[in-house]
Amino acid sequence: MVMSNFGNIGIVLVTFVFVCAATGNEESLETYVHARPGGISGSDPTEMRQHHPPSMLCMDIKPQHSVDIKQIIGIWHGNEIIMHTQDIPGVYRYDSCITFYLSDVTEQLRDYYQPNYRKVEGLHSSSEVHREGMGVGAGTTHRHTNTRYLRLIWNENDDNIEYNFNYTMNHPGLWTNVGEQRGSMVARNKYNQFSGTVQVVKAVGDHLVLTFCSSDIHHSIYTVVLSREEQGLGQDVIRSIRGLLSRRGLYTESIRQVCVKSSAMALSRSPLLVISSVLLLVLICISRKVQ
């Protein structure tokens, strides 16, 4: 009962702080935390606000060579989106949650994108082609069977976008967009079509890091950090991922953290931590009002 009361107090205090923060900017749906001084771009503010050239949009960031596609199929939860071509550094926090669902759709899309696949496959299996060794038919079949297809559904609140990608078994960490996207965002004319590649920067048991590289200069290059567990990744893992991207030559000072409200609610399960954190935020809020 005591722990339950502490939890309720924590929720009330969290609510107060969010209301307090909102009064400073009622039209904003996000909170902003300025980037730390002396970031990866240097301490000069003009240096931190420069744009990256369009040629960077689809640069090779050395995607993971060995990716077990079967292991990454399924549901992933968004932690943050790192904008690599954003010119304003800082951490932007959003209440909206992101969920990715990855599925293998090779059998569904192969006939559509490779209409001659079945025919060539049949020829290759015949004794005549086998006698010819690695002839034209055999080489073509190998190329067809080496190409596979993935579907990625990006859900954010009540909206979704559906992507289709192909990749080869030789390079499972590089996905190329095929066709146009579909989904509620497209139907409501709130989405610009993406054309380019997705590079799998890191794929391990509990997290997945995908970098979207558009071939259109009007789009940005950005990385989505995902976790298998809904509660998200620890700060040590997050810092490691940002460091990895920095070493690959990507700007990592503009970050959009997602599902912040859910994280705050999860903290309410630890009442003492919530109360101490919230009291600090209350003091900050009061000091801002005094100023």
Image (cartoon, grey):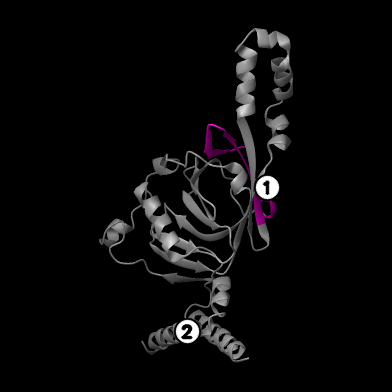
User: Which element type, helix, strand or loop, lies under badge 2?
Assistant: helix
- The number of numbered badges drawn on the structure is 2
At 56% from the left edge and 80% from the top edge, which residue is drawn?
Answer: 268
In the picture, which quadrant includes the C terminus?
bottom left
Magenta residues (range)? 160-187
Q: Please tell me whether mark 1 sits on a helix, a strand or a loop.
A: loop
Upstream in sequence: badge 1 or badge 2: 1
Q: Nearer the viewer, mark 1 or mark 2?
A: 2
Q: Residues within 10 Å of mark 1 (few under 14, many from 20)?
A: some
The amino acid pointed to by label 2 is Val
Measured from the top left, where is residue 59 in percent x and y? Answer: 42, 40
**Which corner quadrant of the image does residue 142 belong to?**
top right
Q: Which residue is mark 1?
A: 182
Which disc number belongs to residue 79?
A: none
Q: Is residue 111 visible?
A: yes
| Circle on res. 278 | 2
In this view of the protein, which residue sits in the foreground, 190 or 237?
237
